[in-house]
Image (cartoon, rainbow, N blue to C red):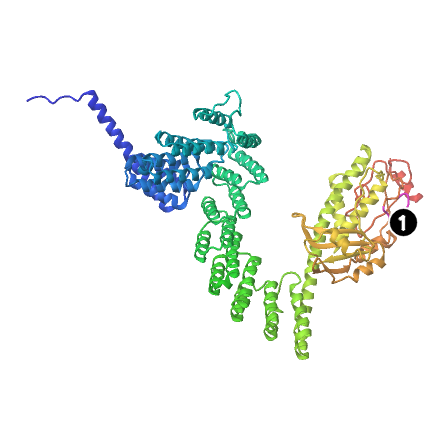
Amino acid sequence: MPEAAAPSDSDSDSSDSDDEDDGAGGADELRIQALEQALQAQPLDYETHVQYIQCLRKSGNIEKLRAAREEMNKYFPLTPKMWQEWAKDEITLRMSEESFGDIEKLYERGVQEYLSIKLWRDYLDFVEEHDPSVSQCTPSGLSKMRDLFERAITAGGLHVAEGSKLWSAYREYEMAILITITDGNDEEKAKQVQRIRTLFHRQLSVPLAEMESTLSEYKSWEAEQGNANDPSSNFDGVPSNVISAYKKANDMYNERKQYEDQLNDAGASEADKLQEFLKYLKFEESSGDPARVQVLYERAVSELPVSKDLWIGYTSYLDRSLKVPSVLRSVYYRATRNCTWVSELWVHHLLSLERIHSSEEELRGVFERAVQCSFATVQEYLNLYLTRVHSLRRRISDGLDFQLIRQTFTDAEEFLSPQLETKELLRLNAYWAKLELNLGKDPGAARGVWENTIKKCGSVLEVWQQYISMELEMGHLREARSLYKRCYSKRFAGSGSEDICHAWIRFEEEHGTLDDYDLAVKKVTPRLKELMVFKSQEEAKLEAYSLNDNSTADDSSQKRKASKMANKQQPAAKKRKENPPKSAKSSDVQGSKTQKVGESTREKVEASTEMKVDSDSRTGNTGSNEPKSSFYTDKCTVFVSNIDLKANEDDLRRFFSDIGGATAIRLLKDKFTKKSRGLAYVDFSDNKHLEAALRKNKQKLLGKKVSIARSDPSKSKKSREAGPSSTGHDNLPQSGDDGAKAPGSRPDKEVAKDDVKITGKNTFFAPRSVVKPLGWTTKDDKTDGGTGELKSNEEFRNLLLKK
């Protein structure tokens, strides 16, 4: 029995490669399945579409590949390279006379999406090679090919960098036709020569790259036709009109060369390239040639297809300049496919279609595509819906049904109301109610819109005001009165509650009977009193909170300043004498705490400030280098509340400018956010101006009625300002005083040279250098006898007998 032959090396290599292919094929299939699942979940994922097409190209499944490309093109425009690959695959796998038309349509779709000179060249070469009528030079074939070349020249013939490639291909085709003409047909041959000459003249009048080589080629061709010229001369044998056009085109090219060089920089980023395109476009627009501007925009969006700035600029330019319906439709269609997330493009698209009198079906289709896109904010959706409504309103005279407007409002309200702010919802529904009343002639539907709005934001004053205004415009006084009765007891923001009460009174004064007026007054009066009490309570709370915050901050800062100033000015020995041990300090704090009961925080701040000033004067801190602390006595001060939060000190100063006399304005602000709290103190120079300021109570500042009251210091503060004699405290001695008068001290009170002025009911806020704790003596204190330390009981007895 013969033995089985051992496998050769080649056989083993072949089997190994087959196994590798099977493994790679299995991996590709798994990859394809994963991408298909991903696209089912996210059909708008651009990168997944690209990867899926690449995997299918490797697998060679032409049917799936074709379907994948069609699916991607349904959502996104394909790049010129992808169109070239698609056409190449179709030509390679199924090129025949039957499939020629399908591949030709592919090229047509590709050249309409982006401007690509390479794609146009491939398209021209394909038709010239595979179209039988063209290859056989039949009259219909010649006409078709020339029309296709003219379209290519129109699309990209002005492309400064690559447009010459299209012109050269056109001339080469015509030269090939010239060769096919027999010698006996002189008339046809002359026509063909003239056709080629015309192409040279047209190209030489366009600013393109390599213009000099084109001129040399033209002269050589003319020499071949028997028109001798001097090769050493640039323009010998060239018609004067062609020379003039060439020089002008060359100057134009030189002006654009710097921009072309910047665009050809391979290392430039997309952001840099965008800026260069924008500069180039600005230059072209200033030159005033719409065709050149359009070609440059096409170049820009071909290289940067998802730049919204380019698409917005391109469409806006076409709306202003060209206004050609077919061009506008094409560009807007491509713009909204490339930048689906830009609502501004969709809005402009709808307006452009309306300008060119497009049908309602086309407008509705674009709008429905737009609302299915993803925008960044709800405001963009609102603008889109309002643009649609505006368009329907303008065309209602053309026979459109008002139900279209009503349905659009209904869809917008259902879709947007959960996310819309109150202001935007009010804008939408107010417009809806207005159109229901004016165009729909249905007051009941208009009231229904307002009632629905009240259910959602009935606490907003503007909703009721506009609802009442609509009823008044229709002359429905009973309905307006009913609305006032429904809303006067509601609480609105700011002064809205008072405003609606006063508005009801004015309404009855102007439109109602005396009984109606009396009823309104009867209803409104207790409500206004209730609001005044509530507002007074709120203002008192705000004032207390404000004073508490300010006193806490000032208290701590004044203590730190007093301690620093005392330590800085006194010598070291004096600091040791006047700074007692910890035990003495604790007794001082305890003693001072027992003296203070029920003093307000504001009084503490003022007492601390006066102590600080008095202490500084006694320690010699009166130099100009020391900052003076701000101290307000509130002698001629008003407290202003209910100030609009947008108001600043300049607004307050203008508010009191008619009475004058304002010396200082203190607008209270939150210590964390630094925003106004709607409260302020205003100091005046004298009581006359103060009384004038009080008379401005309840006047409006920035649309809000402000409350103005006199800032009345407490009685304890007044008693402190009366001086030491009224407080019942003895003057305490202080060592090292120089008797200097404190800056800012009261002029009607003289302080003794060796006395310390103690204000307030306790000494808790007095500097340590002023107040000594009980039992504290310095080393320099002497007994009245002046004999120093006692030596015996006899000496002590003698001392008592002396006293």
- The percent position of residue 755, horizontal first and vertical second, equals 88, 45
Viewer-side residue, 136 vs 691: 136
Mark 1 residue type: Pro
Instruction: From the viewer's perspective, tell me whether residue 713 is left or right of residue 348.
Output: right
Occupied quadrant, residue 657: bottom right
Q: Is residue 22 above or below residue 468?
A: above
Residue 454 in view? no
Q: Which residue is mark 1?
A: 747
Q: Which residues are magenta?
A: 744-754
Viewer-side residue, 24 vs 206: 206
Magenta stretch contains residue 657? no
Viewer-side residue, 54 vs 742: 54
What residue lies at 91% left-to-right and 39% top-to-bottom? Answer: 785
Quarter in which the C terminus is drawn: top right
Residue 669 in view? yes
Q: Residue furthest right?
A: 802
- Mark 1: give few (<14), some (14-19) or many (20+) Cα within 10 Å: few
- The percent position of residue 215, horizontal first and vertical second, equals 50, 27
Q: Is residue 758 above or below residue 391?
A: above
Viewer-side residue, 465 vs 246: 246
Chief secondary structure of the magenta portion: loop
Q: Residue furthest left?
A: 1
- The percent position of residue 42, horizontal first and vertical second, equals 39, 45
Instruction: From the viewer's perspective, tell me whether residue 95 is left or right of residue 296.
Output: left
What residue lies at 58% left-to-right and 67% top-to-bottom? Answer: 467
